[in-house]
């Protein structure tokens, strides 16, 4: 039995992970779940799935969670990020699914890596902000990091039985999001409701906006660099609107392997949980006879500047990806609260990268300070 802790069980990835665990009760045991603000759903999940522990990171919600679970005596209730960090290091935990959104995932991921746990990594922001630190800690503490992001799971599956030195390049596919065919002029007027309508994937609000702005793909480029140890020149983004080819690896002999499947996150979640085994399931299958076409095109980095900024941040290294991420979290929040327009998000990110202090060799404390400073400055600029 693999004992799994789900960080962010109330989110899109978290709820799908609970489904995967419930479908395989003889293989996986749910040890702990965490949520931040959705106390009702967290309490319901604790009642239905009966983990040993439930943690609400927003401490002000502890009393109501405790109250909602007052008749459930086999589930221990805790609050706060420190409780999450303590929980992931417990000897009963085998695997930690990092499915909370944003920078908030960094601290508990570090705690899990330092405890040598196997990480099923959904929270890509962690690798964007501090990829170098996470990878060196993972090597030191023998913590395996298994990708959950569909593109990285695809690459990971293509690399089974291969050596990393045989990689010529990674072909990271992108749906292009809801605005793929829009002109710059049209992008000026898109609303948050338009941006929240992703053509192929049903995800949390923040990553859905990141997908519409192509920042998600930019983050995934940085994520791929750290997960697979490749250089910038070895990562190519290819727009593939149907989201059936989840990514590809081109090898040094010119051969290309691709992983295909329906757009359903339960598949990469399940693969990370069961790796190196494959488990059977009844999820929808790809039917090639029903598929009109699979198409591929070049991304437009003039229209979707975030993708270019992510490549630039990766190239500069140091705390630049941390600046990129913090600025992005603030502008996405502002866009979701109707404070700025869609294209202003990229303007502000560009401003932050050009203006805020660069550090070539940041420590963990420097990342924390950079994140706080960038958030403050970008929020001030928005006003
Ligand atoms: P959601 O917004 O659906 O869920 C986010 C989760 O994080 C919720 O459980 C939420 O709790 C919790 N959370 C929010 N803020 C905090 C905080 N400050 N501290 C601790 N926990 C917090 O996001 P998704 O599930 O869509 O995405 C999660 C991660 O997975 C992201 O990093 C995303 O990039 C990545 N990912 C997602 C994919 C998808 O298909 N959704 C695909 C690939 C990667 P609550 O709701 O209770 O407030
Ligand atoms: Mg992805």
Image (cartoon, grey):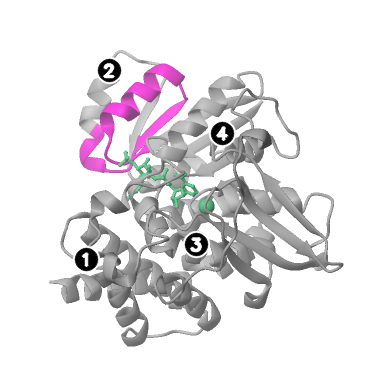
**Mark 4 closeness class: few <14, some 14–19, many ≥20 residues within 10 Å:** many
- Left or right: residue 158 compared with residue 114: right
Q: Quadrant of residue 172?
A: bottom right
The question of residue 56 being in magenta is answered with yes
Q: Residue furthest top?
A: 71
Mark 3 in CB contact with mark 4 (< 8 angstroms): no
Q: Kindly report the distance in space between the C-alpha atoms of the residues bearing marks 2 and 1.
A: 45 Å
Mark 2 in CB contact with mark 1 (< 8 angstroms): no
Q: Kindly report the distance in space between the C-alpha atoms of the residues bearing marks 2 and 3.
A: 43 Å
Task: Please state the horizontal and vertical placement of residue 136, each as a whole percent of the image.
Answer: 63, 66
CB at mark 2 closer than 8 A to ligand 1?
A: no
Report which residue position mark 3 lands on: 217
Q: Which residues are magenta?
A: 35-62
Badge 3 marks a residue whose secondary structure is: helix
Report which residue position mark 1 lands on: 341
CB at mark 3 closer than 8 A to ligand 2?
A: yes
Report which residue position mark 4 lands on: 4
Q: Quadrant of the N terminus?
A: top right
Report which residue position mark 2 lands on: 70
Q: Kindly report the distance in space between the C-alpha atoms of the residues bearing marks 3 and 4.
A: 28 Å
């Amino acid at each position: 039995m693999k004992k799994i802790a789900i960080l962010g069980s109330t989110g899109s990835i978290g709820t799908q992970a609970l489904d995967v665990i419930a479908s395989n009760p003889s293989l996986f045991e749910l040890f702990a779940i965490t949520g931040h603000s959705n106390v009702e759903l967290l309490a319901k999940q604790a009642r239905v799935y009966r983990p040993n522990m439930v943690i609400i990171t927003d401490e002000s919600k502890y009393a109501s969670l405790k109250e909602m679970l007052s008749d459930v005596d086999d589930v221990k209730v805790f609050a706060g990020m420190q409780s999450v960090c303590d929980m992931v290091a417990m000897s009963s935990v085998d695997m930690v699914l990092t499915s909370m959104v944003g920078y908030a995932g960094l601290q508990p991921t570090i705690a899990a890596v330092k405890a040598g746990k196997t990480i099923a990594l959904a929270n890509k922001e962690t690798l964007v902000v501090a990829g170098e630190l996470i990878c060196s800690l993972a090597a030191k503490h023998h913590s395996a990091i298994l990708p959950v992001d569909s593109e990285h799971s695809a690459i990971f599956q293509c690399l089974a039985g291969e050596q990393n030195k045989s990689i010529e390049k990674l072909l990271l596919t992108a749906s292009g999001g809801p605005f793929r065919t829009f002109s710059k002029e049209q992008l000026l007027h898109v609303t948050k409701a338009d941006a929240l309508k992703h053509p192929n994937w049903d995800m949390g609000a923040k990553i859905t906006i990141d997908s519409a702005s192509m920042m998600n793909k930019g983050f995934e480029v940085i994520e791929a660099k750290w997960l697979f140890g490749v250089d910038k020149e070895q990562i190519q983004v290819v727009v593939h609107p149907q989201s059936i080819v989840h990514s590809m690896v081109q090898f040094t002999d010119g051969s290309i392997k691709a992983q295909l499947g329906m757009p359903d996150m339960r598949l990469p979640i399940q693969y990370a949980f069961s790796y190196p085994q494959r488990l059977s399931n009844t999820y929808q299958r790809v039917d090639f006879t029903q598929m009109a076409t699979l198409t591929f095109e070049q991304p437009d980095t003039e229209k979707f500047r975030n993708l270019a900024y992510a490549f630039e941040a990766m190239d500069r290294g140091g705390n630049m990806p941390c600046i990129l991420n913090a600025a992005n979290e603030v502008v996405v929040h502002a866009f979701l609260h109707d404070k700025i327009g869609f294209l202003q998000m990229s303007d502000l990110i560009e401003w932050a990268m050009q203006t805020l202090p660069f550090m070539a060799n940041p420590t963990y404390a420097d990342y924390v300070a950079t994140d706080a400073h960038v958030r403050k400055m970008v929020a001030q600029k928005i006003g």
